[in-house]
Image (tube, rainbow, N blue to C red):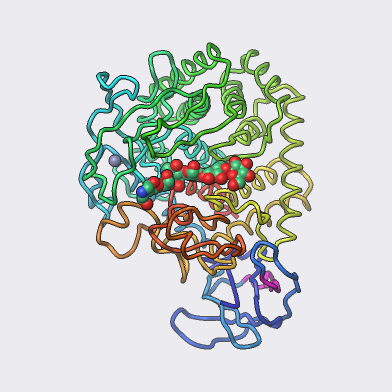
Amino acid sequence: MAVLCNQVGYLPKCRKTAVLTAGKHFKVIQAEPGQDDGQVVMEGDARDADVDAASGDHVHVADFSQITQEGTYYIQNESGERSHCFRIGQDVYRALQKDMTKALYYQRCGCGLQEAYAGVYEHPVCHAHKAVLWSDHSVEKEVSGGWHDAGDYGRYISPAAVAVGHLLYAYLLFPDSFKDSLNIPESGNGFPDVLNECRYELEWMLKMQDEEGGAYHKLTSERHADFIMPEEDHAQFYLFTVSSMATADYAASMALASRVYRAYDDDFADRLYEAAVRACGWLERYPEYVGFRNPESCNTGEYDDVCDLDERLWAAAEMLVITGEQKYQEQMDRLLKENLTKTDFGWTDVSGFAALAILTDESHRASAESVADLRGAVLAEADRLVAVAEQSGYGVAMEPEDYIWGSNMVVLNRGMLLVLAALVIEQEDRKNAYEQTALAQLDYLLGMNAVDYSYVTGYGDHACRNPHNRPTECDGIELPMPGWVSGGPFKTPCDEVGREHIPEGTPPMKCYLDHAACYSLNEITIYWNSPAIFVAAYFNGK
Ligand code: G3I
Ligand code: 9MR
Ligand code: ZN
């Protein structure tokens, strides 16, 4: 492909760019899907953006922002090569956001997926049996429920907390973008469906706390299941030890959830709040880092982290917002003096959630120093990301070394940070720069990248179709559920097929394969969808 575009579409009032890897002159042509040549609505020369470091491509950037007329178009370069067709329209991200949220429903565990809601992806109840403690197999616990984390059937607390965190903030900040029904069992019960879907995860999380208030790090079998449907997986599931990272993420997400659900259901909000307070009690009694490592025989996700201070910071911030108590303000002030980024929203580093909590708290409960510190960090990072994106021929706020496992999460977390910066800045020009750069992260995700893939299943002419996801591989249905974000390129693929097919030295942005065996390139996870939902929800109102 010589002309790369956002295959889903562009918003009428926002910046619109495409990338040419051959030629400079371009035409924007109106197209009705399936039909040939239409009217040329614009002609121009693309800007020479030189060699893009992450892809090795010499690119030209075509700016066609001036086209605001809704419709379907494609872009053609001077050799007659065409981009995929795309739409310009106010609602281009609406169905996308909805399906990315609905995708979480397909991860529900401990229940059957009924045809009325799941259509062809229905399946009988899975993983409903009791789990036992890893440390003492004679202790059984009922901990069914929640979402399968990813292409595997494990359920892990930190990824769950982070995913729920993204979703609840998306709803809190952009409630108007969550009006569509998701057609899930609870639809129509008076709650927005995003809260219904999150509640399924939260009810499971409520079961994942031990007598002391600590959160079990994870609930998985000893080894990853073979490629079988979830209802065929009868392996014993274990509750692994408590970690301080999981417990702090747990406290934070429970506190946030109690704040959000308070408006709808007092009893549920109380249960969440109590769980958060008990987890905070554990954190106070165990002020030192308590890590987690897989026992030698276990190969399911580890989600190990060497530092729990960012998780403790997030917990303190959420508790401060909800209680206004002095002790949480002090905890925050102390933790902010540590060497933390304050701008990240991934499972290893959640410090950005503290900024999100404090900078969007209308009651201003944090100390003036904390607010200034967080605001300064967010704006400095946003300025840095704008500069990084300007250096990228594809407009993405990624440097070559940023293409790690799940690089699309990095892209989307950076999109979130830019959205947060746009929400807190007063100056119009900087706000515009942050918004434009945030939107460019969606352009990249949806096809304006060096491999010409839309990384969201079902969205775009050339979307990935073979995610590493057990049900997708086993259900005998050709297409995966729509709305899944793939992990995306990884500069050093570590699954067998990826290693075999991607030669060493391949530019990072091109280290991708749409192959079901490639768990390090093409898996799906709840916490790769959730930041995409946050960013899309922001732009759905634009
Ligand atoms: O944090 C370091 C960073 O400092 C360094 O610069 C960079 C360079 O490689 O690496 C970063 O660490 C990476 C880490 O994720 C944090 O992002 C590791 O390289 C990378 O291997 C690690 O990948 C994780 C992977 O599990 C292996 O542990 C993914 O983030 C994580 O999403 C993935 O999670 C799996 C679960 O274990 C099981 N369920 C599916 C899920 C998705 O694949
Ligand atoms: O399917 C598993 C995926 O969710 C994990 O991200 C990945 C790394 O932990 O492991 C996958 O499972 C593989 C297992 O580790 C080794 N045998 C092959 C499994 C499927 O490819
Ligand atoms: Zn299950």
Q: How many marks?
A: 0
Rendering coords of residue 376 (x, y %): 77, 36
Give x and y (percent) for residue 290: 52, 22
Quarter of the image for the N terminus: give it: bottom right
Q: Residue at x 61, y 56 (%)?
A: 441
Q: Is residue 237 above or below residue 80?
A: above
Quadrant location of residue 392?
bottom right
Q: Where is residue 15, by image quadrant?
A: bottom right
Q: From the image, which quarter does the C terminus lie in?
A: bottom right
Task: Please indicate, yes or no, whether residue 347 appears anywhere in the rendered image.
Answer: yes
60 within the magenta span: yes
Q: 170 above or below 483?
A: above
> Foreground: 53 or 186?
53
Residue 258 screen position, x and y as percent: 47, 26
Residue 182 visible in the current orientation: no
Looking at this view, is 438 or 392 the one in front? Answer: 392
Which residue is painted at 39% across and 39% down in the image? Answer: 300
Which residue does the image show at 36% across and 34% down from the upper left?
Answer: 297
Q: Nearer the viewer, residue 312 or 179?
A: 312
Whole-percent x and y of residue 520? Answer: 47, 52
**Is 65 displayed left or right of 201 in the figure?**
right
Q: In the picture shown, does residue 175 fall above or below 262?
A: below
User: Is-magenta flag for residue 116?
Assistant: no
> In this picture, which residue range is highlighted in magenta?
57-68
Q: Is residue 84 left or right of residue 155?
A: right
